[in-house]
Amino acid sequence: MRIIARPPVIGVVIRDHALAMRIIDNARELGFETHWAVSIDELPLTARYVVLSRTDGEADTHGRTPIYVEDYPSIGCMFLNLLSKERSGQGPRRIEVAIDPGKNIGLALAIDEVIIGVETHVSIESLVRRIDEFLKCFGRDRGAAIYVGESGGEMAHEIVEKLKKRFMNVSILMIPEEGSKKTEIGMNLTKDEKSALVIYQRAKSQV
């Protein structure tokens, strides 16, 4: 996932070496500056969040925000939650997904009307799995909507049909892209990711 805006610095203080490595690898793939230490005292002051394991017992985080890995269904979900805390907006409590259909499928993820990241997927199956994870991370106390760009033709309709079968309680809308303007953010993103942002902006303008 490509993160919109710079992610926060995090510390990892976990005794389980294999678990710590999985967390660090996942964090660095997302662009987090990550510091692994034996104790919280060894972390730099810039690390405002500390990833911990409850199996190691409670810890004094010295004013930093603790994040316990056991509190989330997956490491990916843990980082999505962290990003949403950093970028939480003042809009309604809502999950939104925008999709640009095509050979490569662009995906934009938003929490409470703030985009936290974009991705590119090469298959509908991969796309559906990612949306499923996203909704499971945040969907308990939020409404949800999925926006699909109409310019994708037959693929757009195929995506919509599969989404309707998988997410029966989620609002799924086709979004016309005529008249959409290029997005001014995410200039280092792929064409598909930029298109997903445009679809999101277009959907919001129609609400």
Image (cartoon, rainbow, N blue to C red):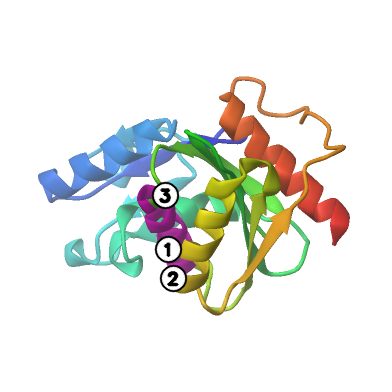
Is residue 61 positioned above or below 120 on the image? Answer: below
The answer to which image quadrant residue 58 occupies is bottom left
Residue at image mark 3: 124
The mark found on residue 166 in the picture is 2
Label 1 and label 3: CA atoms lie apart by 12 Å
> Residue 81, position in %: x, y?
49, 57
Q: Residue at left 67%, top 67%?
A: 94
Asked if the residue at tag 2 contacts the one at tag 1, i.e. Cβ–Cβ closer than 8 Å, the answer is yes
Q: How many marks?
A: 3
> Residue 195, position in %: x, y?
66, 34
Which of pointers 1 and 2 indicates the residue nearer the eye?
A: 2
Residue type of the residue flagged with mark 2? Arg
Residue type of the residue flagged with mark 3? Ile
Describe the element under mark 2 as helix, strand or loop.
helix
Label 2 and label 3: CA atoms lie apart by 12 Å
Q: Earlier in the sequence, mark 1 or mark 2?
A: 1
Label 1 and label 2: CA atoms lie apart by 8 Å
Q: Quadrant of the C terminus?
A: bottom right
> Residue 56, position in %: x, y?
18, 61
The mark found on residue 132 in the picture is 1
- Taking the image as shown, residue 200 lies to the left or right of residue 68, namely right
Magenta stretch bounds: 125-137
Which of the two residues, 160 or 115, is positioned nearer the viewer here?
160
Q: Residue at left 60%, top 25%?
A: 191
Residue type of the residue flagged with mark 1? Asp
